[in-house]
Image (cartoon, rainbow, N blue to C red):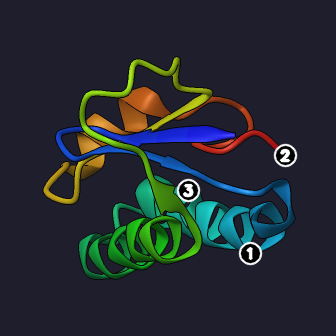
Amino acid sequence: MIVRIMGEGQVKLDDSHFPKLNELDDELTAEVEARDEEGFRRTLTALLDAVRGMGTPLDADALEPSDLLLPPPDASIDEVRAMLTDDGLIPD
């Protein structure tokens, strides 16, 4: 799966990493709903770090369609809330 972190680029992730990412996504969704700014910031950072660490970066000039779009690290709770679906940011 190709994942784009807005403002950073794309990484290729193996599907085997998604259970861990879904755990972080569920936590992030709960923090957005609770308007827990400190928890939200911590979990968003952890989610993006996990994607970067587990994924293989694609070349900046690669033109691969993204399967998943994640917010930038400096996104606000309201910006992330607007991106959420019934499954959070990452489909189950």
Question: In this picture, is 84 found above or below 19?
Answer: above
Q: Quadrant of residue 80?
A: top left
Q: Amino acid at mark 2?
A: Asp
Query: In the picture provided, is 59 more to the left or to the right than 2?
Result: left
Marking on residue 29:
3
Question: First in sequence: mark 2 or mark 1?
Answer: 1
Question: Foreground: 82 or 12?
Answer: 12
Q: Which residue is mark 2?
A: 92
Residue kind at label 1, given as amino acid type: Lys
**Residue 32 appears at what percent x and percent y?**
43, 56
Disc 1 element? helix
In the figure, residue 63 lies in which quadrant? top left
Per the image, label 3 sits on a secondary structure element best described as helix
The residue shown at (59%, 37%) is 2
Location of residue 21 with respect to 63 vertically, above or below: below
* Disc 2 element: loop
Residue 81: which numbered mark, if any?
none
Which residue corresponds to the image point at 23% horizontal and 48% vertical from the top-left? 72
